[in-house]
Each structure stands twice: as structure tokens, then as C-alpha cells.
Amino acid sequence: MGASLKDMNPFVECSTLPVSTRPVDLTSTHLKDYSLVVLFSASWPEIESVSRAAREASTPFIWGCTLGGAGVVFNDLGVHHYVDERPKEGGDAQENETYTVQGEIIYRSLWDTLSTPLNRRGRRDKPMYAVLRACYRAYTESGVDMGPAAAPVVKQVRDAMCAEENIPLDRIPDATIDTMLLAPKDVSAVCTVVGGVVGNEVIRAVSGKGLPMDNIFLYNLHDGWGKIEKHPL
């Protein structure tokens, strides 16, 4: 892979870790010299381990995941500086005239991002974030990973979360959990959407050009929508 990328752009230095390297074995020492860490799919232990190591190393981190009919992209770029071209407005603006703005985004960690209380979210908000949060809590409390076997545990956690935060169960329907955890295989349409988002975020993160996502993208084929949300609220 590294050789192929080098052939595409000889001005970019590319290196890869040995295929025998397990994500859970990566430490901040391994990651400190990299410009960006991208982790796709993976298990909860791997996701948590790599995201913590990247944050400790102050290395930007992007996680992408497809599960059945659902997809997630998460950014933790640390303190990220960017430049963005925006259309100039007003009576004296010329056609297609733009101006440059500089900005800074301070990102939150994955575990902070998955901590927004559900009762702070609007009634009309889509339930994918709540399902992802229930999946993470099921892992931290019971050690279950994302997949069909986790569905009963995630639904129990969903029930507990709704009771604790005084929200109705229909805010997090079984259908959304099933779309994410019970589909027999990943759906190509979801892979296409998530892969495209990850690719765009990698370019923005590495180049510093363009406003990157802040901080999580959620896609659900059951509802046919994708949405960027910022957490914690």
C-alpha cells in the first residue's frame, strides 16, 4: 500500500507498519512521528486503545466504521489549524470571488464525544448517536463488541439509559439498533458513503485546507440520512 501511494504522488512520504502489528499493541511512541492515524472498522478494544495512544502522542486520529446498514466517521484532530476559502458576499463582490479565513478547532476525545446525555438532545434528533453511545457503554460495562451477539445487551443498556435520563424508549427504536448490529454483512452503499467521508477528512486533516468535520458523522441506511454532529453537547 505504501509503495502504491508513493507511485501516485512521489512528493509524499509513505510508510506502513508490518501486517503482524496489532492495533491494540500500538503506543504513543509508535504514533508520535506520524501526521495522521486512520483506523477503519476494528473492535472496541482496538478503537479505544488506538484513539487513546494517538491522543497521548498528539497525533490526529480519524476512525471510520461500517456496520450493516450504518456508518460512523469520527475526528479527533487535537488542536487543528486550518485555512478555508469562502465566497465573498455583498454588493461589491465579483462573481466567484472568495476570501480566505484562518481558524482553529479544539477536538474532544472519543470517550468525551460518547458522553452527551440523551436528555440534552432534541426530540427530533435521529437516534444513531444514542445507539452508538449504547454500544460503547455495553462494551465498557459488559465487554461485548459490536455485532449480532451484542444486540440484546445493547437493548438492555438502551433501556437503562432511557430510564436514567427520563426519555421514552421510542426515541431509540429497536429498528435502528437492528440496522447497525443485525445486518448479515456491510452494505456497499454505506461503505461508499463512509469511505468518501473518510477520504475527504484525511485530505483536510493533512493539508490544513478546508474546514474539517467537527466531530462525528453518522449515517443510517434505514432512515436514508447522514448527519454531522458535535459532541459532547
Image: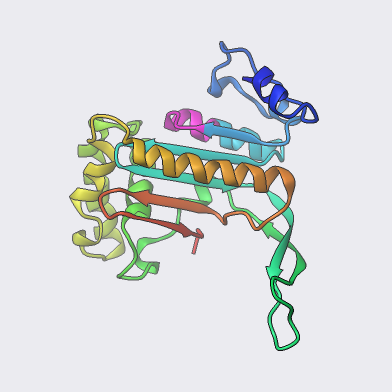
Q: Can residue 45 be found in the magenta stretch?
A: yes
Q: Nearer the viewer, residue 81 or 143?
A: 81
* x and y, in percent, of residue 154 in the image: 26, 42
* x and y, in percent, of residue 3 in the image: 68, 17
* x and y, in percent, of residue 132 in the image: 37, 47
Q: Nearer the viewer, residue 15 or 200?
A: 200
* x and y, in percent, of residue 166 in the image: 26, 66
Residue 185 quadrant: top left
Q: Quadrant of the N terminus?
A: top right
Residue 55 quadrant: top right
Relative vertical location of residue 84 with respect to residue 61 in this rendering, above or below = below
Q: Residue furthest bottom?
A: 91
Q: Residue furthest right?
A: 11
Left or right: where 112 falls relative to 88 = left
Secondary structure mostly taken by the magenta-highlighted segment of the chain: helix
Color encoding of the figure: rainbow
Left or right: where 158 falls relative to 204 = left
Relative vertical location of residue 199 with respect to residue 105 in this rendering, above or below = above
Which residues make up the magenta segment?
40-49
Residue at image position (68%, 37%) is 56
Residue at image position (23%, 30%) is 184
Q: Can residue 21 be found in the magenta stretch?
A: no
Q: Nearer the viewer, residue 93 or 112?
A: 93
Q: Residue furthest front?
A: 95
Q: Nearer the viewer, residue 8 or 152?
A: 8
Residue at image position (35%, 70%) is 122
Left or right: where 178 falls relative to 46 = left
Relative vertical location of residue 12 with respect to residue 208 in this rendering, above or below = above
